[in-house]
Amino acid sequence: MKKHNYSAGPCILPQEVFEKASQAILNFNNSGLSILEISHRSKDFVAVMEEARSLVLELLNLEGKGYQVLFLQGGASLEFLRVPYNLMKVEGKAAYLDTGTWANGAIKEAKSFGETVIVGSSKEENYNHIPKEYQIPSDANYFHCTSNNTIFGTQIKNFPKTNVPIVCDMSSDIFSRSLDFSNFDLIYAGAQKNIGPAGTTLIIVKEEILGKTNRNIPNILNYQQHITKESMYNTPPVFAVYTSLLTLQWLKKIGGISAIEKINETKANILYSEIDRNPLFTGVASKEDRSIMNATFVLKNPEHQELFDTMWKEAGISGINGHRSVGGYRASMYNALPIESVQVLVNVMKELENKI
Ligand SMILES: *Cc1c(COP(=O)(O)O)cnc(C)c1O
Protein backbone atom coordinates (compact mmCIF):
# COMPACT_ATOMS: atom_id res chain seq x y z
CA MET A 1 0.00 0.00 0.00
CA LYS A 2 1.23 3.51 -0.83
CA LYS A 3 2.21 5.42 2.32
CA HIS A 4 1.05 8.89 3.29
CA ASN A 5 4.42 10.48 2.70
CA TYR A 6 5.23 13.57 4.78
CA SER A 7 8.96 13.42 4.13
CA ALA A 8 10.67 16.85 4.07
CA GLY A 9 12.89 16.02 1.10
CA PRO A 10 13.44 14.05 -1.04
CA CYS A 11 9.72 13.77 -0.86
CA ILE A 12 6.48 12.81 -2.49
CA LEU A 13 5.89 13.45 -6.20
CA PRO A 14 2.64 12.85 -8.10
CA GLN A 15 1.97 9.14 -8.60
CA GLU A 16 1.49 9.65 -12.35
CA VAL A 17 4.95 11.22 -12.51
CA PHE A 18 6.47 8.10 -10.93
CA GLU A 19 4.66 5.96 -13.47
CA LYS A 20 5.66 8.00 -16.52
CA ALA A 21 9.24 8.33 -15.31
CA SER A 22 9.54 4.56 -14.86
CA GLN A 23 8.13 4.03 -18.33
CA ALA A 24 10.80 6.37 -19.78
CA ILE A 25 13.53 4.30 -18.12
CA LEU A 26 12.34 1.30 -20.10
CA ASN A 27 11.41 2.95 -23.38
CA PHE A 28 11.62 6.70 -23.84
CA ASN A 29 9.15 8.22 -26.34
CA ASN A 30 8.81 4.82 -28.05
CA SER A 31 12.39 5.19 -29.24
CA GLY A 32 13.40 1.67 -28.22
CA LEU A 33 15.92 3.29 -25.88
CA SER A 34 15.93 4.24 -22.22
CA ILE A 35 16.08 7.91 -21.20
CA LEU A 36 19.20 6.81 -19.31
CA GLU A 37 21.08 5.65 -22.40
CA ILE A 38 20.46 8.39 -24.96
CA SER A 39 22.71 11.34 -25.67
CA HIS A 40 21.81 14.57 -23.92
CA ARG A 41 22.42 16.18 -27.32
CA SER A 42 19.81 13.98 -29.00
CA LYS A 43 16.77 15.71 -30.46
CA ASP A 44 14.47 14.04 -27.95
CA PHE A 45 16.41 15.15 -24.90
CA VAL A 46 17.06 18.68 -26.15
CA ALA A 47 13.28 18.96 -26.52
CA VAL A 48 12.86 17.86 -22.87
CA MET A 49 15.27 20.52 -21.64
CA GLU A 50 13.68 23.24 -23.76
CA GLU A 51 10.16 22.38 -22.68
CA ALA A 52 11.18 22.24 -19.01
CA ARG A 53 12.89 25.62 -19.24
CA SER A 54 9.97 27.31 -20.94
CA LEU A 55 7.32 25.69 -18.74
CA VAL A 56 9.04 27.15 -15.68
CA LEU A 57 8.68 30.66 -17.10
CA GLU A 58 5.09 30.00 -18.13
CA LEU A 59 4.03 28.67 -14.71
CA LEU A 60 5.74 31.55 -12.87
CA ASN A 61 4.35 34.13 -15.32
CA LEU A 62 7.84 35.30 -16.24
CA GLU A 63 7.74 34.92 -20.01
CA GLY A 64 9.33 37.75 -21.97
CA LYS A 65 10.62 39.50 -18.85
CA GLY A 66 14.35 38.92 -19.32
CA TYR A 67 14.67 35.75 -17.26
CA GLN A 68 16.73 32.65 -18.07
CA VAL A 69 16.12 29.19 -16.66
CA LEU A 70 18.82 26.65 -15.85
CA PHE A 71 18.74 23.09 -14.53
CA LEU A 72 22.16 22.57 -12.94
CA GLN A 73 23.75 20.19 -10.45
CA GLY A 74 25.13 20.60 -6.95
CA GLY A 75 21.89 21.17 -5.08
CA ALA A 76 20.72 24.39 -3.47
CA SER A 77 23.94 24.19 -1.43
CA LEU A 78 26.07 24.92 -4.49
CA GLU A 79 23.93 28.00 -5.18
CA PHE A 80 24.89 29.28 -1.72
CA LEU A 81 28.34 29.62 -3.27
CA ARG A 82 27.46 30.36 -6.89
CA VAL A 83 25.29 33.34 -5.95
CA PRO A 84 28.05 35.42 -4.28
CA TYR A 85 30.55 34.27 -6.93
CA ASN A 86 28.34 35.72 -9.65
CA LEU A 87 26.78 38.68 -7.88
CA MET A 88 29.09 40.04 -5.20
CA LYS A 89 31.53 42.62 -6.48
CA VAL A 90 35.18 42.49 -5.53
CA GLU A 91 35.21 44.33 -2.20
CA GLY A 92 31.44 44.38 -2.45
CA LYS A 93 28.72 43.81 0.07
CA ALA A 94 25.68 41.56 0.31
CA ALA A 95 22.69 41.57 2.67
CA TYR A 96 21.25 38.37 4.13
CA LEU A 97 18.17 37.59 6.21
CA ASP A 98 18.96 34.88 8.77
CA THR A 99 15.86 32.71 9.13
CA GLY A 100 17.40 29.32 9.86
CA THR A 101 19.78 26.53 8.99
CA TRP A 102 19.63 26.96 5.22
CA ALA A 103 19.93 30.75 5.37
CA ASN A 104 22.99 30.18 7.52
CA GLY A 105 24.50 27.85 4.96
CA ALA A 106 24.15 30.63 2.39
CA ILE A 107 25.64 33.24 4.74
CA LYS A 108 28.70 31.09 5.45
CA GLU A 109 29.56 30.81 1.76
CA ALA A 110 29.03 34.53 1.10
CA LYS A 111 31.47 35.47 3.85
CA SER A 112 34.43 34.27 1.81
CA PHE A 113 33.56 36.71 -0.98
CA GLY A 114 33.04 40.01 0.81
CA GLU A 115 31.18 41.90 3.48
CA THR A 116 28.08 40.01 4.50
CA VAL A 117 25.53 42.08 6.40
CA ILE A 118 22.90 40.16 8.38
CA VAL A 119 19.94 42.52 8.27
CA GLY A 120 17.75 40.47 10.61
CA SER A 121 17.83 37.19 12.50
CA SER A 122 15.46 35.10 14.61
CA LYS A 123 18.24 32.86 15.89
CA GLU A 124 17.67 33.82 19.53
CA GLU A 125 14.18 32.27 19.40
CA ASN A 126 15.37 29.17 17.55
CA TYR A 127 14.00 30.62 14.31
CA ASN A 128 10.34 30.33 15.29
CA HIS A 129 9.41 33.47 13.33
CA ILE A 130 10.48 35.65 10.42
CA PRO A 131 12.27 38.90 11.36
CA LYS A 132 10.40 41.99 10.15
CA GLU A 133 11.16 45.73 9.98
CA TYR A 134 14.72 45.23 8.80
CA GLN A 135 16.67 47.63 6.59
CA ILE A 136 18.52 46.58 3.45
CA PRO A 137 21.61 48.76 2.81
CA SER A 138 21.12 50.52 -0.51
CA ASP A 139 24.71 49.82 -1.54
CA ALA A 140 24.38 46.02 -1.15
CA ASN A 141 25.04 44.07 -4.37
CA TYR A 142 22.02 41.90 -3.56
CA PHE A 143 19.67 40.85 -0.77
CA HIS A 144 19.31 37.12 -0.05
CA CYS A 145 16.39 35.46 1.73
CA THR A 146 14.92 31.98 2.17
CA SER A 147 11.21 32.00 1.32
CA ASN A 148 10.33 28.88 3.30
CA ASN A 149 12.30 27.51 6.23
CA THR A 150 11.85 23.79 5.76
CA ILE A 151 13.26 22.84 9.16
CA PHE A 152 11.51 25.39 11.37
CA GLY A 153 8.19 25.62 9.51
CA THR A 154 8.20 29.37 8.88
CA GLN A 155 7.52 31.14 5.60
CA ILE A 156 7.98 34.70 4.40
CA LYS A 157 4.57 36.17 3.57
CA ASN A 158 5.72 39.69 2.65
CA PHE A 159 8.90 40.27 0.73
CA PRO A 160 10.71 43.60 1.06
CA LYS A 161 10.47 46.38 -1.50
CA THR A 162 13.98 47.44 -2.41
CA ASN A 163 16.06 48.64 -5.33
CA VAL A 164 18.70 46.06 -4.46
CA PRO A 165 18.42 42.82 -6.51
CA ILE A 166 16.54 40.13 -4.54
CA VAL A 167 17.88 36.57 -4.48
CA CYS A 168 15.65 33.92 -2.98
CA ASP A 169 16.18 30.30 -1.99
CA MET A 170 12.75 28.85 -2.77
CA SER A 171 13.79 25.21 -2.46
CA SER A 172 10.84 24.14 -0.36
CA ASP A 173 7.97 26.29 -1.60
CA ILE A 174 8.52 27.08 -5.26
CA PHE A 175 5.40 26.44 -7.38
CA SER A 176 3.28 26.20 -4.21
CA ARG A 177 1.79 29.70 -4.01
CA SER A 178 1.15 32.76 -6.17
CA LEU A 179 3.72 35.52 -5.87
CA ASP A 180 4.80 38.27 -8.22
CA PHE A 181 7.91 36.37 -9.24
CA SER A 182 9.12 39.35 -11.27
CA ASN A 183 10.03 41.02 -7.96
CA PHE A 184 12.89 38.54 -7.69
CA ASP A 185 16.12 38.77 -9.65
CA LEU A 186 17.39 35.29 -8.94
CA ILE A 187 15.46 32.31 -7.60
CA TYR A 188 16.95 28.91 -6.93
CA ALA A 189 15.52 25.64 -5.69
CA GLY A 190 16.86 22.14 -5.21
CA ALA A 191 14.45 19.98 -7.19
CA GLN A 192 13.81 17.38 -4.50
CA LYS A 193 11.09 19.27 -2.63
CA ASN A 194 8.49 20.43 -5.09
CA ILE A 195 9.87 19.74 -8.54
CA GLY A 196 11.46 16.34 -9.04
CA PRO A 197 14.11 13.93 -7.81
CA ALA A 198 17.35 15.03 -6.16
CA GLY A 199 20.11 15.71 -8.67
CA THR A 200 19.14 18.97 -10.28
CA THR A 201 18.70 22.55 -9.09
CA LEU A 202 16.38 25.00 -10.78
CA ILE A 203 17.77 28.49 -11.25
CA ILE A 204 15.78 31.41 -12.64
CA VAL A 205 17.86 34.50 -13.19
CA LYS A 206 17.23 37.92 -14.65
CA GLU A 207 20.02 38.09 -17.16
CA GLU A 208 20.67 41.82 -16.73
CA ILE A 209 22.01 41.35 -13.16
CA LEU A 210 24.91 39.18 -14.38
CA GLY A 211 28.38 40.25 -15.49
CA LYS A 212 28.79 43.13 -13.05
CA THR A 213 31.36 41.82 -10.58
CA ASN A 214 34.71 42.19 -12.39
CA ARG A 215 35.51 38.85 -10.77
CA ASN A 216 37.03 35.96 -12.69
CA ILE A 217 34.39 33.22 -12.46
CA PRO A 218 35.28 29.61 -13.37
CA ASN A 219 33.05 28.42 -16.23
CA ILE A 220 31.31 25.68 -14.30
CA LEU A 221 30.26 28.21 -11.66
CA ASN A 222 29.39 30.97 -14.10
CA TYR A 223 25.65 31.46 -14.71
CA GLN A 224 26.37 33.29 -17.96
CA GLN A 225 28.28 30.29 -19.34
CA HIS A 226 25.39 27.99 -18.54
CA ILE A 227 22.93 30.39 -20.18
CA THR A 228 25.04 30.62 -23.33
CA LYS A 229 25.15 26.82 -23.47
CA GLU A 230 21.38 26.56 -22.92
CA SER A 231 21.81 24.65 -19.67
CA MET A 232 24.00 22.04 -21.43
CA TYR A 233 27.48 23.30 -20.62
CA ASN A 234 28.23 19.76 -19.49
CA THR A 235 26.08 16.63 -19.33
CA PRO A 236 22.90 17.63 -17.49
CA PRO A 237 21.25 15.23 -15.01
CA VAL A 238 18.93 13.90 -17.71
CA PHE A 239 16.64 11.77 -15.57
CA ALA A 240 16.16 14.46 -12.91
CA VAL A 241 15.36 17.05 -15.58
CA TYR A 242 12.94 14.73 -17.38
CA THR A 243 11.12 13.85 -14.15
CA SER A 244 10.98 17.54 -13.25
CA LEU A 245 9.38 18.21 -16.63
CA LEU A 246 6.74 15.58 -15.88
CA THR A 247 5.93 17.32 -12.58
CA LEU A 248 5.70 20.70 -14.29
CA GLN A 249 3.37 19.22 -16.92
CA TRP A 250 1.24 17.74 -14.14
CA LEU A 251 1.07 21.13 -12.41
CA LYS A 252 0.03 22.87 -15.61
CA LYS A 253 -2.63 20.23 -16.26
CA ILE A 254 -4.26 20.65 -12.87
CA GLY A 255 -4.47 24.43 -13.33
CA GLY A 256 -1.04 25.82 -12.43
CA ILE A 257 0.04 27.66 -9.32
CA SER A 258 -3.30 29.32 -8.52
CA ALA A 259 -5.00 25.90 -8.47
CA ILE A 260 -2.35 24.18 -6.36
CA GLU A 261 -2.23 27.15 -4.00
CA LYS A 262 -5.89 26.63 -3.07
CA ILE A 263 -5.24 22.94 -2.40
CA ASN A 264 -2.15 23.74 -0.34
CA GLU A 265 -4.07 26.28 1.74
CA THR A 266 -6.83 23.76 2.34
CA LYS A 267 -4.33 21.14 3.50
CA ALA A 268 -2.53 23.59 5.79
CA ASN A 269 -5.84 24.82 7.26
CA ILE A 270 -6.99 21.30 8.04
CA LEU A 271 -3.77 20.46 9.87
CA TYR A 272 -3.18 23.77 11.68
CA SER A 273 -6.82 23.88 12.84
CA GLU A 274 -6.31 20.51 14.48
CA ILE A 275 -2.95 21.50 16.01
CA ASP A 276 -4.67 24.56 17.52
CA ARG A 277 -7.83 22.73 18.60
CA ASN A 278 -6.36 19.52 19.99
CA PRO A 279 -5.33 20.05 23.64
CA LEU A 280 -2.50 17.49 23.31
CA PHE A 281 -0.56 19.43 20.66
CA THR A 282 0.96 22.82 20.15
CA GLY A 283 2.48 24.50 17.07
CA VAL A 284 6.15 25.54 16.99
CA ALA A 285 6.22 28.48 14.56
CA SER A 286 4.52 31.85 15.24
CA LYS A 287 1.07 31.80 13.76
CA GLU A 288 1.53 34.70 11.36
CA ASP A 289 4.63 33.11 9.83
CA ARG A 290 3.44 29.52 9.60
CA SER A 291 4.51 27.68 6.49
CA ILE A 292 1.84 26.11 4.30
CA MET A 293 4.45 23.54 3.22
CA ASN A 294 6.07 22.34 6.47
CA ALA A 295 4.02 22.33 9.68
CA THR A 296 6.06 21.93 12.88
CA PHE A 297 4.31 20.86 16.09
CA VAL A 298 4.99 19.07 19.37
CA LEU A 299 3.13 16.97 21.90
CA LYS A 300 2.67 18.97 25.11
CA ASN A 301 3.32 15.84 27.16
CA PRO A 302 6.29 13.78 25.92
CA GLU A 303 4.80 10.71 27.57
CA HIS A 304 2.25 10.51 24.76
CA GLN A 305 4.94 10.14 22.15
CA GLU A 306 5.21 6.38 22.09
CA LEU A 307 1.49 5.86 21.62
CA PHE A 308 1.21 8.61 18.98
CA ASP A 309 4.18 7.23 17.03
CA THR A 310 2.65 3.76 17.00
CA MET A 311 -0.70 5.12 15.88
CA TRP A 312 0.51 7.18 12.94
CA LYS A 313 2.75 4.38 11.75
CA GLU A 314 -0.21 2.00 11.84
CA ALA A 315 -2.24 4.51 9.80
CA GLY A 316 0.33 4.26 6.99
CA ILE A 317 1.97 7.62 7.65
CA SER A 318 5.67 8.06 6.96
CA GLY A 319 8.21 10.83 7.54
CA ILE A 320 6.68 13.13 10.16
CA ASN A 321 9.51 13.12 12.67
CA GLY A 322 10.78 16.65 13.29
CA HIS A 323 14.28 17.76 12.38
CA ARG A 324 16.77 17.13 15.19
CA SER A 325 17.26 20.88 15.77
CA VAL A 326 13.55 21.39 16.51
CA GLY A 327 12.29 18.01 17.77
CA GLY A 328 8.64 17.00 17.80
CA TYR A 329 6.95 16.55 14.46
CA ARG A 330 7.10 18.09 11.02
CA ALA A 331 4.45 17.39 8.43
CA SER A 332 5.67 18.40 4.98
CA MET A 333 2.70 19.01 2.72
CA TYR A 334 4.30 19.53 -0.66
CA ASN A 335 2.25 19.98 -3.84
CA ALA A 336 1.87 16.27 -4.54
CA LEU A 337 0.58 15.33 -1.07
CA PRO A 338 -3.14 14.56 -1.39
CA ILE A 339 -5.70 16.21 0.93
CA GLU A 340 -6.74 12.69 2.04
CA SER A 341 -3.29 12.15 3.58
CA VAL A 342 -3.79 15.23 5.76
CA GLN A 343 -7.18 13.91 6.79
CA VAL A 344 -5.58 10.64 7.88
CA LEU A 345 -3.05 12.46 10.08
CA VAL A 346 -5.73 14.68 11.64
CA ASN A 347 -7.85 11.62 12.39
CA VAL A 348 -4.92 9.99 14.20
CA MET A 349 -4.46 13.17 16.27
CA LYS A 350 -8.17 13.08 17.19
CA GLU A 351 -8.01 9.38 18.07
CA LEU A 352 -5.05 10.03 20.34
CA GLU A 353 -7.07 12.66 22.16
CA ASN A 354 -9.94 10.18 22.61
CA LYS A 355 -7.65 7.50 23.97
CA ILE A 356 -6.03 9.71 26.58
C1 LIG B 1 16.72 21.30 1.39
C2 LIG B 1 17.06 22.72 1.33
C3 LIG B 1 18.34 23.16 0.93
C4 LIG B 1 19.48 22.21 0.61
O1 LIG B 1 19.29 21.66 -0.60
P1 LIG B 1 20.40 20.68 -1.28
O2 LIG B 1 19.82 20.51 -2.64
O3 LIG B 1 20.42 19.45 -0.46
O4 LIG B 1 21.70 21.38 -1.27
C5 LIG B 1 18.56 24.52 0.84
N1 LIG B 1 17.59 25.40 1.15
C6 LIG B 1 16.36 25.02 1.55
C7 LIG B 1 15.33 26.05 1.85
C8 LIG B 1 16.06 23.67 1.65
O5 LIG B 1 14.84 23.29 2.04
Image (spheres, helix red, strand yellow):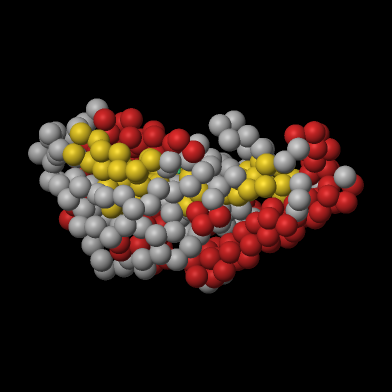
Residue 140 as seen in the image, left or right of residue 181: left
Query: Where 250 sits versus 19, above or below?
Result: below
- Residue at the outermost right position: 355
Q: Quadrant of residue 314?
A: top right
Residue 299: where, in percent of width, then height?
72, 41
Residue at position x 35%, y 36% in the image: 106
What is the x, y in percent for residue 131? 40, 48
Which residue occupies 65% across, 56% down? 272
| Residue drawn at point x = 23 percent, y = 62 percent | 66
Q: Give residue 148's position: percent from left, percent from top.
A: 47, 49
Q: Position of residue 190 (x, y in %)?
A: 44, 44
For the C terminus, the quadrant is top right
Residue closer to the observer: 200 or 78:
78
Vertical relation: 314 (above or below) 267: above
In the picture, residue 350 is in which quadrant? bottom right
Residue depicted at x 26% and y 30%: 111
As drawn, which residue projects farthest toward the top? Answer: 112
Q: Is residue 309 left or right of residue 333?
A: right
Q: Is residue 18 visible?
A: yes
The answer to whether 61 appears left or right of 326 in the picture is: left
Say whether residue 305 is visible: no
The answer to whether 318 appears left or right of 77 in the picture is right
- Total number of numbered labels? 0
